Amino acid sequence: MTDFQKNLEKYAEIAIKIGVNLQENQSLVIRASINAKDIVRKIVKKAYEAGGKDVLVEWSDDEVSLIRFMNAPKEALKEFPKWKAEGYAEMAKNGTAFLTVSAPNPDLLKDIDPSRVALSRKTSAMAMKDFSFMMRSGKVNWTALVIPTESWAEKVYPDLTTEDGLHKLWDDIFKITRVATPDPISAWKEHINNLQAKLELLNSKKYKKLHFKGPGTDLTMNLPDDQVWIGGGMTTESGIFCVPNVPTEEVFTAPLKSTVNGTVKSTKPLSYNGSLIDNFSFTFENGKIVDFSAEQGYEVLKKMLETDETSPYLGEVALVPHDSPISNTKTVFYNTLFDENASCHLAVGSAYASCIENGGKMSKDELEGNDLNTSLIHVDFMIGSAELNIDGETPDGKIEPIFRKGNWDK
């Protein structure tokens, strides 16, 4: 077995043992690109070796998606298979685990009318809203990981040949996801423990307000009294600890929906639905985005914020030090899973219910009653840099530094 195949085996093992943390006699659904077939086969094998009951794979193909967006009538973009939406919701209710393996092309849909893409995505989001709510509410254990493609490598490393860029991207991913360490599983457990120390600090402080200040950013938000900071992973209602994102470097919680005010400027491009949005900014008043701009992808951004009435509100605030493994590669990956774990970020759209005490047991109406946002979308965008400062206000009104020059103050 080549070193590359050995690393693929390790990556697959991380996906099952750390990411989704598949339990004995638990079924697994894998949603994957056909470009990921090699690692998917290894993941399936690891799942059965871990005692999984059954593994179902749903394949997707970017080229087929592109053909559909180019040729399907508009009416087709308004339809989504009812059997699929109901099937996923039923599997989630029955305790199935879910794993996504994407193989991105950041520019796949750059020449497609943004309104067609937005219509299709909204149709899908509305159909799958019950399933998505269960994932965000901690009802199921799930994870997501990424594998390189030639088109992605060409975007990330334009000065390299396609072959060299693909090799480098694989090497970077293996390093970032701790595959390249002698014992990846132990390395991941140590990393999760390190994140727990930050969580203990933040959860003990119970900051009532955060203030972000950096180039183009001057933003404040209040946090719930019963806030819960999460990082490294989450524990489902049934007690399974999973790591939804591989890699992960963040600790995060949810702001109070109606309390966000000020301006914020992006520090990395956002790849959204096969199109890039870059150099964009938002202005918030009483929680809602009331103005925005973008040097690239303005129409895509506009359609995203029009997905539903609550899309222009925040659902997540996440802290990631500038001095961290992904950031230190000094590479823009044009992929949210990687870029969000290199930078402090916010998310428009839905909050995670587990970010307040007993939130996982609440309905959507109850979450909204606690001033947490619920939406059809959840889109992270990066705001971190070496110049970002963050202050926290304690319940007794004391202002404390949390981040200075992009990194933890303590």
Image (spheres, rainbow, N blue to C red):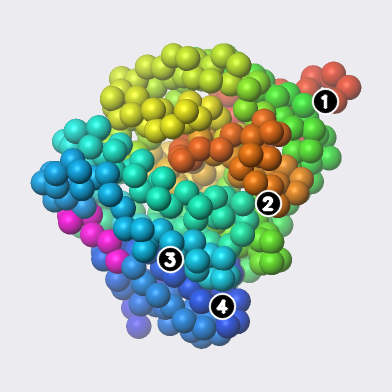
Residue at the farthest left position: 71
Label 3: which secondary element: helix
Residue 112 in percent (x, y) is at: 18, 37
- Residue at image point 47% right, 49% down: 129
Quadrant of the rendered image containing residue 357: top right
The disc, 2 or 3, on the residue closer to the chain's N-terminal end is: 3
CA–CA distance in space, label 1 to label 3: 45 Å
Give the amino acid at mark 3: Gly
Magenta segment, which residues? 59-64
Residue that carries the numbered disc 1 in the rendered image: 394
- Residue at image point 43% right, 82% down: 45
Residue that carries the numbered disc 3 in the rendered image: 87
Q: Nearer the viewer, residue 91 or 43?
A: 91
Check the image and report above or below for 220 versus 315: above
Check the image and report above or below for 281 versus 188: above
Disc sitting over residue 360 in the figure:
2
Query: In this image, 59 relative to 75: left or right?
Result: right
Label 2: which secondary element: helix
The disc, 2 or 4, on the residue closer to the chain's N-terminal end is: 4
- Residue at image point 43% right, 61% down: 86
Give the amino acid at mark 1: Thr
Mark 2 or mark 4, whichever is nearer to me: 2
Residue at the farthest right position: 396
